[in-house]
Amino acid sequence: MSSALTCLFAGNSGSRVYYLDQGNNVRELAWNGSGWDSNPLAPGQPANPGAPLTCVYTGGFGLPLFSDVYYQDVGNNIRRLFWTGNGWDDKNVLAPAKPGGPLACLDTGGRASRVYYLDQGNNIREVGWDGRGFLKISDPLAPAKQRRVPRLLPGPRE
């Protein structure tokens, strides 16, 4: 299997691993306490072959806990698969992205999250979920090819 791979810890529900199957559909491996269950996620658009996956576990602070999985579909759109508490849903198409470009997300507390991706112009973009809907950030964060990452550890100067 040659697939993107991402994982999360879903609290009392255990570990989850997400990957693409041979048909480029997103699947979940869920730890049930004694072994792994393999589950298809909502039947939606297949992923772009070789597309990245990312996931986040949101909630807490008195709110229900949810899993979100983001991927790039065959039309190069970033899509969101999310656990409703009763099953998976895939109604959210977030934005067009660079084919095969990187994808990342994080939980910002409660039911809020952010998704980062490269647009087709190679700019870093952010889409945010505020618990009621997606907020599309209109301005690019930075041109990806010009972005310089600061050093985190001391080292020789360039």
Image (cartoon, rainbow, N blue to C red):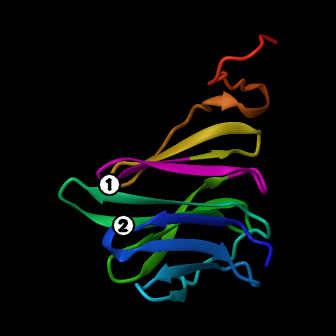
Highlighted range, magenta: 97-115
Report crowding for label 2: few under 14, some 14 to 19, many 20 or more residues within 10 A (C-alpha).
Answer: some
Residue under the image location 76 percent in, 50 percent down: 98
From the viewer's side, name the closer residue of 60 and 49: 60
Residue 79 horizontal/vertical position (percent): 58, 64
Residue under the image location 17 percent in, 58 percent down: 62
Q: Is residue 52 found left or right of 90 in the rendered image?
A: right
What's under tag 1, amino acid-wise? Arg
From the viewer's side, name the closer residue of 68 and 136: 68
C-beta proximity under 8 Å, tags 1 and 2: yes
Residue 135 horizontal/vertical position (percent): 44, 45
Query: From what the image shows, is residue 149 above or below residue 20?
Result: above
Marks 1 and 2, how far apart at CA: 8 Å
Q: Which residue is mark 2?
A: 66
Task: Choose the circle earlier in sequence order: 1 or 2.
Answer: 2
Residue under the image location 75 percent in, 51 percent down: 101
What's under tag 2, amino acid-wise? Phe
Viewport quadrant of the N terminus: bottom right
SS under mark 1? loop
Farthest residue, direction top: 157
Q: Is residue 91 found left or right of 112 in the rendered image?
A: right
- In the rendered picture of this protein, how many numbered marks are placed on residues? 2
Q: Which residue is mark 1?
A: 111
Q: Is residue 87 found left or right of 5 in the rendered image?
A: left
